[in-house]
Amino acid sequence: MSHRKLAIDGHDAEQEQIAQQIQYLSTKTSAEVAALVDQKAAAVRALITRGSTLEALERALVDAPYGRGMEPAQAANALLVNEILMATRAQDVAQVVAGLPEDERDVLLKYVYHGLARPAEFNCGVLLAWHERIVEAAGLGSIVRVMSDRRTI
Amino acid sequence: MSVLDEFTFPFCVTAYSFNGDKSQVALCPNSNEVHIYARSGTQWVQTHVLKEHDLLVTSIDWAPQTNRIVSCSQDKNAYVWTFDQAAVVWRPTLVHLRINRAATQARWSPQENKFAVASGDKCVAICYFGEENNWWVSKHLKKPIASTVLCVDWHPNNVLIACGGTDMKARVLSAFIKGVDQKPPSTAWGERLPFNTLCGEFESPSSGWVHSVGFSPDGESLAFASHDSSITVATPATGDVTSVRSPNLPFTSLVWSDQSTIVVSGHDCSPMVYAFDGSAWRLVAKLGEDDKSRRSSTASPSNSNSAFNLFRQMDSRSQPAKSSGTADGMLKSVHQNTITELRSDPAGNPVEISSSGLDGKLIQWRVQA
């Protein structure tokens, strides 16, 4: 039953077209994006140690890498966001979420789902707590936006 | 903000349209038929059943002045129905759409001499009456459209048309037909407008299928609702494109009430009113939910007996408890299910709109504080 193992998404002309469209939106090469994420990482870690979670989060969520060929940068950025989420005290979560602009809440929710999809690598208990606070603040609309957005991180 | 009229049909209302004075309504009971109901006191009484389509009727539009109905269906056909006074019947005329996918939405132009049919065939069919052939002719708007078109709306100048669909874009195109249309005065959308001119292309922040488009009453702005739970308003004269991210489920229908008020509805069962406060579009009201008079019978959650009553009712009526509702298992909204369509007033009254739902309700609303 080899056809069952076929990844049909790779054979879909429309998917191909969408992937290309998304590619045009980001003008940087994968190496440039990876360098940017590395640069960000140092600044973000400094912010975490100073305890300014909100600032660190905003910094990490801006220009989240997406698109084909960006996988290393995407993984690095996901780890970076995850570090911030883990470093935040449980009682501060609601306040941090409230401080985020609307569009960045949606990006943060993408990272929460990214983590929940990889339970071996990320702490899902903490992510669930974040998920609850984000949906409280941004509503179900935020979940729908993550699902409809083709710019997956 | 109140309910002017409410009537519950014993079936899902999936498409409907009032006639010019709202004394009659054509609606689709989620089947291949179009039913005409006439007003009789507070009731709607069935007068005609229009059976010509083979598959589900997807959209109905009743031209208020010329009193013609256009209906389109998944069977790839559209019919124009004219009323025969002498025989008291509606006579169908088949429209030669030339599409090979389902038709999704049909709308008469403001002057009612053309209509547009959106379709799954990656095109919008612009139909007009060819006098020499005695036949409805269609011309296709095709060029930049990459996928199914879900919605169309006419600009007040009778030439421009907005469409949106599953290619995540809302577009403004020219539907100028030589010999039918006069040359329109130039607007911010463009000056020379031959058929199929692309005058604007917009996308919402997280993309998503465009479920509904609408021109503002003066035609200067275009608003659309898409499946990322957002509304986007674009004004080409100023270059502004603003989006509102909603905390609710996606909106599937959008109408302008006046120049600074948009009403949207969808999976959340309440029509929501967004108003422009000078700098941004904000949610100002959910129609029906602030209406205390309708809620007299429902117990407040603080009442200590309400939970007891809830369980006793569930026990006696053997009904399952429903979440996010009131004690009697009803939702707080007037509609009890998804709203299928929102329509503005056929006579052009800006404060009156109407809605239909999967719960069978047909409701007329007043949109004003």
Image (cartoon, coloured by chain):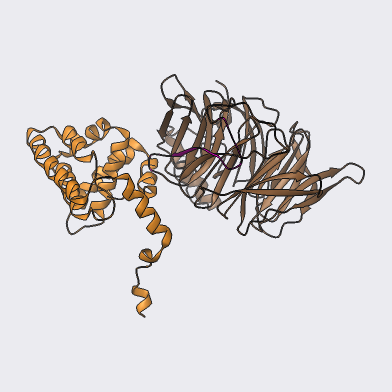
Q: Could you tell me what secondary structure mostly forms the magenta stretch? A: loop
Q: Which chain is orange?
A: A
Relative depth, front residue between B314 and A41: A41
Residue B339 appears in which quarter of the rendering?
Answer: top right
Say if B14 sits above or below B283 in the image: below
Relative depth, front residue between B11 and B260: B260
Is residue B329 visible in this depiction of the protein?
A: no
Say if B12 sits above or below B332 in the image: below
Q: Quadrant of the N terminus of chain B?
A: top right
Left or right side of B141 for A131: left
Q: Which chain is brown?
A: B
Q: Residue at x 47, y 23 (%)?
A: B276
Furthest residue in direction bottom, as rendered: A1
Residue A99: horizontal and vertical position, in percent?
A: 25, 30
Write down the region rendered in magenta.
Answer: B191-206
Say if B54 sits above or below B83 in the image: below
Q: Quadrant of the C terminus of chain B?
A: top right
Residue A39: horizontal and vertical position, in percent?
A: 12, 41
Furthest residue in direction right, as rendered: B86
Left or right side of A34 for B61: right
Residue B153 appears in which quarter of the rendering?
Answer: top right
